[in-house]
Image: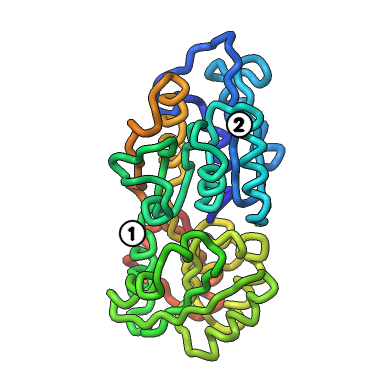
Amino acid sequence: MDRRGALATLVGTLVLGGALGVRAQPTTTVRRIGILETGFGPTPAELQQFWTSVGALGWIEGKNLVVDFRFAGGRPELLQPYAQELVRLNVEIIGTLGTAAAIAAKNATTRVPIVMMIAGDPVSAGLVASLARPGGNITGFGITPELRNKRAELARELLPSAQRIGVLVDPASPIVGFYTREELERPYRSFGMQPVIVEVAAASELENAVAELARRQAQVLIVDEEHIFIPDRGLLMRAALRHALPTIVSGIEYLEAGGLLSLLFDSAENDRVFAYFVDKILRGTKPADLPVQQPSRFVLSINLKTAKALGLKIPQSLLVRADEVIQ
């Protein structure tokens, strides 16, 4: 997923309700929360922006708010020990970015409230009982399979004649593990397209995987939110360009690395929702009483440089809807 988009705006808006228009009041009680992420940490500038933003609302680093960050850097085996460490630190909330991070936190505690900053299909992943009544100690912001359907629809709009859609999946991904092959293929088949699914178990396999998609005559490559691809997104996008595969990706980082179209949840909305949950829980509401929220808006970005390199003309219907265009 787009770590920079989701996390950079997070560090600017994790303000305990301030993003919803309610200014947090200063307090002499030090509150402690933890953040557990599958991907990579913020830059120094992003971290400074975080403390500047919370400071403007009365939450001062080391005075009345402590945030413990744990970033797995694309290494999922680190998530469980990091989650256990946050529990030992007695944080009041664990915020999780990524489905694997949420699962690690769930396995680490049934006591500490867990707020999903983002998680894919939290019901299918076994994180909550239902969106309306999550139960247990977990709530937050979850993406249902709707986003996968929307990316399939984009592929149809981009190339109406395309029949074969390439999809790379990490077999170790928690989301992939909760779906049958039929469920993974359903969004594409619903648009009359044939999915060409290639599994990638390590970043070193990416180039060969893209070559395999090309050999099997895939006409578009769709890249969902898979942690294994993030560190080597440049390699992945270059491989797709070499094989003349237009790409529909999951965030601005992929787009800047050479992706063609990106569709992702609105990170500003994500941050407002996360801040809302944190504020509610720190003020005494139980996670079980807070329904899981879903994206109401998705951000479409287009890389016209990549379109030119591929010799593709982007349909006007997409251009007029784009939130961001890279010239």
Kindly identify the amino acid type of the residue bearing the numbered disc 2.
Answer: Phe
Mark 1 element type = helix
255 left or right, relative to 162: right
> Hey, which quadrant is residue 205 in on the image?
bottom right
| Residue drawn 62% across the image and 51% down it | 39
- Counting from the top left corner in percent of width and height, residue 86 is at 63, 35
Q: CA distance from mark 1 to mark 2?
A: 31 Å
| Residue drawn 58% across the image and 84% down it | 243
Q: Residues within 10 Å of mark 2 (few under 14, many from 20)?
A: many
Query: Closer to us: mark 1 or mark 2?
Result: 1
User: Which is more toward the observer, 98 or 301?
Assistant: 98
- How many marks can you see? 2
User: Which is more toward the observer, 239 or 289?
Assistant: 289
- Counting from the top left corner in percent of width and height, residue 117 is at 48, 42
Q: Is residue 165 visible?
A: yes
Q: Is residue 255 visible?
A: no
